[in-house]
Every structure is written in structure tokens, then in C-alpha cells.
Image: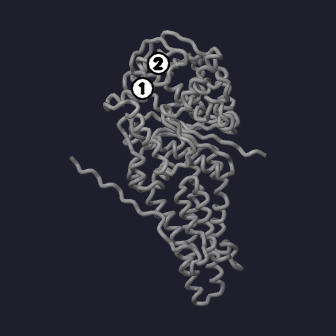
């Protein structure tokens, strides 16, 4: 039996400004999937990157009075720098303006679609939103404004290259309806099917070099046009695999992969679930197997975005409150369907209540009791101990520990990240209840007083609690890798027993309220 190969990607964001928490959500979700599947023995490649070749980047650079490449490089570095603050186990980061793999891959993809007869030139007039880098029909606007950015789109008239998207209507419908292209959650799958059923029009896939300010990848054989930024950007999923040169990574991680999983925001769903699969079909490439869609993070009810006003810097948040506090809020608070409103107060409250008071306090007092009552040596459950089952409440603790791996896997197979944390947290809750129920300090007093069976029961309780903490370390690893490693270290005995207990988390202070004007 061959080892499954899983390719996990995030979208690649525009670098017209520094990263925000909404993109951090996508990175953390992808990281959880990659870490979990690696722990299952699967071969995983986790890729992210930056979309450098956007007109948005050019306009932002002009507004800043900075050369475009310098501006793009500076902001792209901030995205690349998310690796450490968010504890990401990323395998590859592609930058579309700098990486030599990218241009050759985009050019090969273009030629493959041209050879299939799917590219042609025509004059076009339409309403274009620079923020979305896409044309809208009047019916798609909200009060005459872009539904994403709330601005009136520009009217653009020029001759461009078009892709015969309409040719792939039936094949795309069959892919999605038949589940070969799985879109989660189901609400987004239905959205895609409705979009396809409404009729697919051919797609403009180039821009004049003049309107693009000369920035981007020239259309092969037509230097007066640059490749449309979305065609360029979507190609990253295979250009980073050496598609342009026919490298072995393309065969291993795209053509031969068991799963090709894209994590995306709801605003770019049609690009990943309609346009991109059609491009691949045209080029003779297999489509993705999964498109996993998250909704938006908001702040004060406004979408968190680089240009939309609401913002939250994940690097600053991790620096102030800790990597685990940021990851945990993103995984525990964000629903599978629906936007989630972020505030620092909510992040602090979640971290203090669950990480410091719940998890941190549990591990600290378990290790402290092993030191206090057994000189740091984890006891083996003796006669009558039954590994903790002999003590009241042991069955429930053992059950949640036994059930957690399967429940976590089931949730992550469904890409339900918040649901995946629930069985892990059930262990914390049950272990804390078990401590309160069994009251080890009273068993220790009874042991000192010579009460029959007290020593064996205390051994059983301590052994069960240490095993619960070990299970927590194992099950938390995809979600909070740093925390999981610290728990494992505190529960790993050396020659002199367990290490001395040390706090897992500090209590966080909520930010001071801003003074009234």
C-alpha cells in the first residue's frame, strides 16, 4: 500500500499592504491539516505564497511613491515572516514576481490552453473593480457598487484575450455535482452549482500592458498584453511544482497526488471552483480534489481587509499575546459557516479561560501533585487501581481520551476546525472534573493516616491524570504545536522523574479601554 500524498495550499494574497488576521486564519487552518495528516503517516506538501503581479500593488506603490518592485518586496517579506509568529510548518512559499519557476509555468499553462483552442482575442467593455481584479455585470453589483469593496467599478473598454469558459459548463457541473471536486461547506457547493447553472460566459484573461502599467507577465507572443492577474495567480498551485520545466514535483504533488486541497476565502470561490478547474481541464491537467471555503473575519462588523478599514495585525497580536492565543482563537471561535467578529478582548478572554485556567492549570497541578505525593515519579496503577478506572470518574476520563483521536479525524476530514477542537477540550474538562471528584490531596492525607487502599487509589488517580495530559499533548499537536511540545516535556520522566512544574501560559491582560473624547 502506497503512502497517500496530500497537497495543501492557501490562496496567495495581494501585497498591496501588510498581512491581516483574515489571511492568518487561512494559514492556520492549512497548517492544522498539514500537521494532522503528517502525524497520520501521510506525505504532505503545504504551500503558500504572495500574489505580486496585481494592479492593486502597482497603484499602492504609486500612492506610496515607491518603485513597484521595492514596494512589493517589502510587503511580501511581511507575509513570508508570518511563519514564526503563527508557528507554521510550511514547505514552500512562492513569490510570483521573483520566483523563476512561476513565469515559465504561467507561460506553459497559457500555451496549453491556446493549443486546446480555448484562447481568442476580442474587444470588450465592462465594469471592472480594481480591488477584486475582476469584471462585474450590472446585476452582480449592489446599488451600483462592488459587493466586496463598496466602490463603483471602473468602465473599461479594450481588446483582450478571452478564455472559452463556456465550453466547460457541463464538465464543471459534473465535477462538482458528482463530488469529484468537493466543495465544503455544502452551502458553498450549492453556490457554485447555482453560478454554473446561471450560464458561464467566456472570461477575459489579459489586460493591456498600458493599463497594467507594464507590470506582470507578458502574454506569450503578444507583448502588448499582460496575463490577467487571476490567471497568473491561480497558476501558482502548479508553477511552484515546476510545471514550467516538467519537474518531478508536478508529477508527484499534482498529477499523482491523492488529494489536492485549496483553502480559500468565500470572496474568491468562483475563481477556485470554476475558473481554475476549467483552466486545468483545458490544459489537460487534473483539477483540485477539494476546495475548502472559510467566511470572513470582521472587526466591529466590518470585514477585516488590507484596504477595507478594519484590520488586525497577526504579527503584532502574536507578539503581544502569544502564538498559541492567536491560533486558539482562530480555531475555537471561527464557525464553519458565517463571519466571526474579532476583538482583542475576545482573544484575551478565550486564552485566559481555556488556555491559562483550563489547560495550563490542569497540567501544572497534575505535575505538581506527582512531585508532592510521589517525588516526581509517575506511579504505575497498582492492584485495585485499574489505571484510574477504580477511582470514581475514571471511566469517563478514559472514554474521552479513547474517543478523541477518532472524533478529531472525523472533524478534520470534514474540514470542521472548530468541531475538531471540541474532543480535545473534552479531555481538559473531564480531567479537571476528575481532579475535583477524586480529590487527590484527601487521598494523600488518607494514605498518611494509613487508610487501606488509599495509596493504590492515589497511584491510580495520578497515573490516569498523567495519561490524560499525554493524550492532550498528542491530540493538541496539530492545533497548538508549541503548547503540545511543552505538555509532552512536562509529562516525560527522566532519571529523577518528571521535570519540576512550570506554567504553560501566562494570564493575559485585556487592553485598556480608549479614553472618551
Q: Is 313 rendered above or below residue 322?
A: above
Residue found at x 59% / y 78%: 496
At x 36%, y 59%, the residue is 509
Question: From where the camera sits, is residue 265 visible?
Answer: no
Position of residue 374 measured from the top left corner of the image (x, y, whole percent): 58, 81
Residue occupying the far right of the picture = 1
The image quarter containing residue 258 is top right
Q: Nearer the viewer, residue 15 or 321?
A: 15
- Rendering quarter of residue 179: top right
Residue at numbered disc 2 = 207
Q: Position of residue 77 (x, y in %)?
A: 43, 41
Pointers 2 and 1 in contact (CB under 8 A)? yes
**Distance Cα–Cα, label 2 vs label 1:** 10 Å
Left or right: 202 with respect to 301?
A: right
User: Number of numbered discs present?
Assistant: 2
Q: Residue at x 48, y 36 (%)?
A: 50
Residue 397 vertical placement versus 27 (above, below): below
- Rendered view: 283 above or below 27: above
Between discs 2 and 1, the one toward the N terminus = 1
In the picture shown, does residue 365 fall above or below 402? below
Classify residue 453 as left or right of residue 127: right
How would you rate the neighbour count of disc 1 (Cα within 10 Å): few for under 14, some for 14-19, many for 20 or more? many
Residue indicated by mark 1: 55
Residue 154: x percent and y percent? 38, 19
* Most foreground residue, 15 or 411: 15
Image coordinates of residue 318 in percent, x first then y, are 42, 52
Q: Residue at x 47, y 18 (%)?
A: 207
- SS under mark 1: helix
Q: Secondary structure at mark 2?
A: strand
Amino acid at each position: 500500500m502506497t503512502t497517500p500524498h496530500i497537497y495543501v495550499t492557501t490562496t496567495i494574497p495581494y501585497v498591496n499592504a501588510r498581512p491581516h488576521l483574515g489571511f492568518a486564519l487561512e494559514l492556520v487552518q492549512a497548517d492544522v491539516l498539514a500537521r494532522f495528516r503528517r502525524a497520520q503517516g501521510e506525505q504532505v506538501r503545504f504551500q503558500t505564497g504572495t500574489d505580486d503581479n496585481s494592479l492593486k500593488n502597482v497603484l499602492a506603490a504609486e500612492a506610496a511613491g515607491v518603485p513597484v518592485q521595492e514596494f512589493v518586496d517589502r510587503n511580501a517579506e511581511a507575509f513570508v515572516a508570518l511563519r514564526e509568529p503563527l508557528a507554521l510548518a510550511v514547505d514552500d512559499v512562492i513569490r510570483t514576481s521573483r520566483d523563476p519557476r512561476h513565469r515559465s509555468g504561467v507561460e506553459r499553462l497559457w500555451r496549453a490552453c491556446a493549443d486546446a483552442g480555448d484562447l481568442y482575442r476580442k474587444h470588450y467593455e465592462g465594469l471592472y473593480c480594481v480591488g477584486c481584479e475582476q469584471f462585474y455585470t450590472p446585476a452582480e453589483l449592489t446599488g451600483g457598487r462592488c459587493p466586496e469593496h463598496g466602490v463603483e467599478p471602473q468602465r473599461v473598454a479594450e481588446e483582450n484575450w478571452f478564455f472559452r469558459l463556456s465550453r466547460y459548463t457541463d464538465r464543471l457541473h459534473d465535477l462538482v455535482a458528482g463530488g469529484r471536486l468537493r466543495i465544503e461547506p455544502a452551502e458553498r457547493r450549492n453556490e457554485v452549482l447555482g453560478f454554473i447553472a446561471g450560464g458561464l460566459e467566456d472570461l477575459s484573461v489579459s489586460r493591456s500592458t498600458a493599463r497594467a502599467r507594464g507590470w506582470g507577465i507578458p502574454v506569450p507572443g503578444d507583448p502588448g498584453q499582460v496575463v490577467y492577474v487571476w490567471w497568473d495567480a491561480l497558476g501558482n498551485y502548479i508553477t511552484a511544482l515546476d510545471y514550467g520545466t516538467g519537474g518531478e514535483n508536478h508529477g508527484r504533488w499534482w498529477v499523482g497526488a491523492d488529494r489536492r486541497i485549496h483553502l480559500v476565502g468565500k470572496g474568491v470561490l468562483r475563481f477556485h471552483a470554476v475558473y481554475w478547474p476549467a483552466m486545468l481541464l483545458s490544459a489537460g491537467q487534473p483539477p483540485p480534489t477539494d476546495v475548502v471555503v472559510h467566511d470572513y473575519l470582521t472587526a466591529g462588523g466590518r470585514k477585516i481587509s488590507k484596504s477595507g478599514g478594519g484590520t488586525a495585525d497577526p504579527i503584532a497580536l502574536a507578539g503581544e499575546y502569544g502564538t498559541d492565543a492567536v491560533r486558539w482563537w482562530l480555531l475555537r471561535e471561527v464557525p464553519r459557516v458565517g463571519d466571526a467578529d474579532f476583538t482583542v478582548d475576545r482573544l484575551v478572554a478565550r486564552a485566559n479561560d481555556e488556555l491559562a485556567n483550563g489547560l495550563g492549570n490542569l497540567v501544572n497541578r497534575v505535575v505538581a501533585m506527582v512531585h508532592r505525593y510521589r517525588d516526581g515519579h509517575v506511579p504505575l496503577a497498582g492492584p485495585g487501581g485499574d489505571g484510574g478506572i477504580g477511582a470514581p470518574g475514571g471511566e469517563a476520563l478514559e472514554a474521552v481520551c479513547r474517543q478523541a483521536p477518532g472524533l478529531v479525524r472525523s472533524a478534520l476530514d470534514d474540514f470542521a476546525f472548530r468541531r475538531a477542537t471540541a474532543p480535545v477540550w473534552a479531555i481538559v474538562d473531564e480531567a479537571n472534573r476528575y481532579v475535583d471528584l477524586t480529590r487527590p490531596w484527601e487521598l494523600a492525607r488518607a494514605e498518611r493516616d494509613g487508610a487501606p487502599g488509599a495509596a493504590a487509589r492515589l497511584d491510580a488517580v495520578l497515573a490516569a491524570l498523567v495519561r490524560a495530559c499525554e493524550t492532550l499533548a498528542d491530540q493538541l499537536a496539530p492545533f497548538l504545536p508549541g503548547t503540545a511540545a511543552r505538555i509532552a516535556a512536562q509529562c516525560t520522566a527522566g532519571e529523577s522523574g518528571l521535570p519540576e512544574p512550570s506554567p504553560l501560559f501566562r494570564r493575559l491582560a485585556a487592553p485598556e479601554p480608549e479614553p472618551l473624547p
